[in-house]
Image (tube, rainbow, N blue to C red):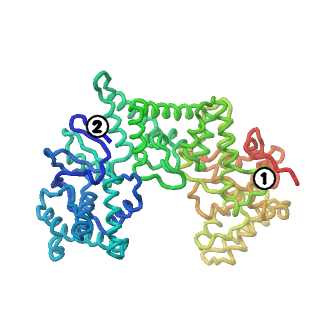
Amino acid sequence: MAGETTEGALLELKLIGDIAGSFRVPRYQRGYRWGELEVKRLLNDIWESKGEPYNLQPVVVKRDGESAWELVDGQQRLTTLYLIFMFMRREGLKNVAPPYSISYDTRAKSGNYLQELDPALADSNIDFFHIHAAYACIRAWFEQKGPTPLKRQEVADDLFRYFCKSVRVIWYEAPKGLDSTTLFTRLNVGRIPLTDAELFKALLLARSRSGAGTTDRTHEIAAQWDSIERDLQHPDVWAFVADEAAADSPTRITLLLDTLAVGPRGRARPRFHTFDVLREKVEQSSPEAVWNQVVQLHALVLGWYENRDHYHKVGYLVAMGQRFSDLVALAPDRTKSEFGAVLDARIRETLDLTPSGVRALSYEPDARKCVRLLLLMNVETVRRMKDSTERYSFRIHRRQGWSLEHIHAQHAESLTKADQWKEWLRLHREALADLPSVDEVRRQELLRRIDDVGDKIDRQVFEELARDVAAAFTRADESTAATEHSVHSVSNLALLANGHNSALSNAVFEVKRRRILELDRQGAYIPICTRQVFLKYYTDADAQQVHFWSTRDREAYLNAILSPDGGVGAYLKPEEPLS
């Protein structure tokens, strides 16, 4: 690949066998420090590439003479590659010297040791020690891959061919005016290497400078790049499109670049896959054509964000693990309504439930399906709010995290510690003291029993008392109707914020209702359907008993979930006909 040179700056892919000249390690760098793990990883990565094009981490240099370089970043890799060359020559596997040399501003003897590799001097200083240990690791690797002299020769032949034909470094020659120490610091604080985005930006700007009969677009592209990054830094924009692979990306524009360079399915992208693919696109067309694709993809994201329907549907699918690039692939040549219909079909496929399947869901075996269903219920409730600018907050959804909780917990067996038992009893005592519909004699007896527990509490005492307290918060006509399935069915489940203590998670409806109202008054974010459950929004007014979660409440909640108008009914698959 021909490099792009502009005032001393250059970015290209360089085969290991084409690296040449003398490299000077400046005084602001420490010496060679790679251990067995890093050396073996480099050798294995190269070996497992099996002759396919493979890119190593970037090597950053500044010109230091006709054929001399200041090695800003990449000392550990180049030194290890140098030692591999030396091993193959010294062992008679290849009659070729390393194609480059390495020297050190402050450790001149280390450069000499790279040539001699005298084991008797290995303990003379820390640099010699690490260089010798790396050389020994290289020897062990060759002996493991080639247990006989003939096999070792075959390994060396293959490795040397990879060096000359397929394994490359991303060679970045920094501009002359850029301070080397500043660049080194930026690359190495937290050991953050050059990213695909940084490399592509450098290539794009270099290729976009004015030539004969062309206009210099570098300032325009740089300004657009910053604007796109700024838009994607908006937390609500980012949260609805950033799939799992992109969520922690240091630069947000990486999501768009990765989408244009879609990687292989079912396995991790090869190192610098995005940069390599976009580089080829630039060479095959033009930098302007590739950059225009990035701009168009940015406009697509903002268009989805501004469209409330697309925002909620895309956001839900991404939250459920769909790849952003797969959703982008659904959009070309479709109108907004057609794209919306395609998203509906994808949601239906992701949900994969019939109405009877929803009714059969149970907490333990179907937790993931329940979460998908209830998240969609919350998203759809917000999306369908007419004349409203409110959006479901995927940002808070990601940051907060939600757990699947029983609306009314009738059992507290999962509590195992004395402080959990005491907290559970404290929460329920407060609610019991204000519960008007419980027989007064019964209530006073329960309050007395709770007060008498004190510090002398054990599992048996707690479980007996918890059973009787929970029964007081359960309608009398529910005792037989509230089967084990109804307790664990989706009609008794809601999304609550992670972080609730276990005593509250195991609490009855009234205790949780009080806590939800308290959080709501404090301005905490509560999923809209969870709030509506504890406000008895779904139950007809004449059937409401505010302190209890009854069978009628459950049925009303379940019917709301199944509704095609306000719930998720429109995304359920039709029932299969009976055979």
Instruction: Tell me which numbered mark, 2 or 1, is placed earlier along the sequence.
Output: 2
* Amino acid tagged 1: Arg
Q: Position of residue 46 (x, y in %)?
A: 37, 60
Q: Residue at x 55, y 31 (%)?
A: 303
Where in the figure is residue 180, as x and y percent of width and height? 20, 46
Query: Which amino acid, mark 2?
Result: Glu
- Rendered position, 335 above or below 54: above
Question: Quick check: 354 left or right of 522?
Answer: right
- Depth check, front residue: 94 or 189: 94
Quarter placement of the C terminus: bottom right
Mark carried by residue 554: 1
Q: CA distance from mark 2 to mark 1?
A: 67 Å
Q: In this view, which residue lies farthest toward the front? A: 150
Q: Confirm whether residue 432 shows in the render.
A: no
Element under disc 1 = helix
Query: Which quarter of the figure has residue 83?
Result: bottom left
Decide: marks 2, 1 in contact (CB < 8 A)? no
Under circle 2, the secondary element is: strand
At horizontal 68% and vertical 53% (from top left) the residue drawn is 494
Q: Residues within 10 Å of mark 1 (few under 14, many from 20)?
A: many
Question: Residue shown at 67%/59% (left/top)?
Answer: 367
Residue, disc 2: 4
